[in-house]
Amino acid sequence: MPGSGPDWVKRWKKYVKSEPAVHIQDLCLPGPITNERIIVQLERSDSQLRAKKDYQGVNALVWNTLVFIHGGGPVICRESLKIDSAEKPPENDKIPEELFSEFPMPLRLQEVRIMALRYNETQGSKSG
């Protein structure tokens, strides 16, 4: 699937690198992250997923940041970065403060600012 694992990470790295773009695909967003292929593999009893080849493990802060910016899911949450470690509940509350700040952002992250403003508005309406 085009939006999962190390392939997505490669597209993301190409997108955020500071070198000049050579091809138009270097300017394209990496798209949403999808873990569907990994979930299908996990359901198989003979699955042998390998780190960095079949999946890229990240902590909750990194995952929530990337999903906040690019979209995606479903989350696969484990006790460690190893896919075969025990399942645990996702830590959905871990989002960097910088995503909600008023500091200027690059143009391609303007959507993040809009999403953050909408999030802040919905949070304000819940408390008031």
Image (cartoon, grey):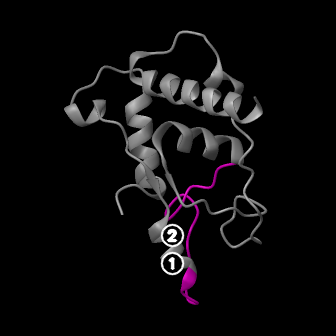
Most prominent secondary structure in the magenta stretch? loop
Of the numbered discs in the image, which one, if any, rests on residue 41?
A: 1
Residue 22: % across, % down:
22, 27
Residue 68 sits inside the magenta stretch? no
Q: Quadrant of the C terminus?
A: top right
Q: Relative to 53, is 61 on the left or the right?
A: right
Q: Is residue 96 above or below residue 94?
A: above
For image coordinates 64% across by 17% down, the residue present is 101
Is residue 122 left or right of 73 when viewed as pictured?
right
Residue reaching furthest to the front: 128
Position of 54 relative to 104 (above/below): below
Q: Amino acid at mark 1?
A: Gln
Asked if residue 47 can be seen in this view, the reply is: no
- Left or right: 27 in relation to 93: left
Residue 115 x/y as whole percent: 52, 30
Q: Is residue 10 above or below residue 85?
A: above
Query: As rendered, which of 6 and 68 lies closer to the eye?
Result: 68
Quarter where residue 52 is shown? bottom right
| Relative vertical location of residue 27 with respect to residue 45 in this rendering, above or below | above
**Residue at the location (54% across, 44% down)?**
67
- Is residue 48 located in the magenta-colored stretch of the structure? yes
Is any part of residue 14 visible from this angle?
yes
Disc 2 + disc 1, Cβ < 8 Å: yes
Element at badge 2? Answer: helix
The magenta region covers: 43-59
SS at badge 1? helix
Q: Is residue 54 left or right of residue 22?
A: right
Percent across and percent down for residue 42 are 57, 78
Out of 65 and 23, give the one closest to the viewer: 65
**Residue depicted at x 50% and y 36%:** 69
Mark 2 = which residue? 38
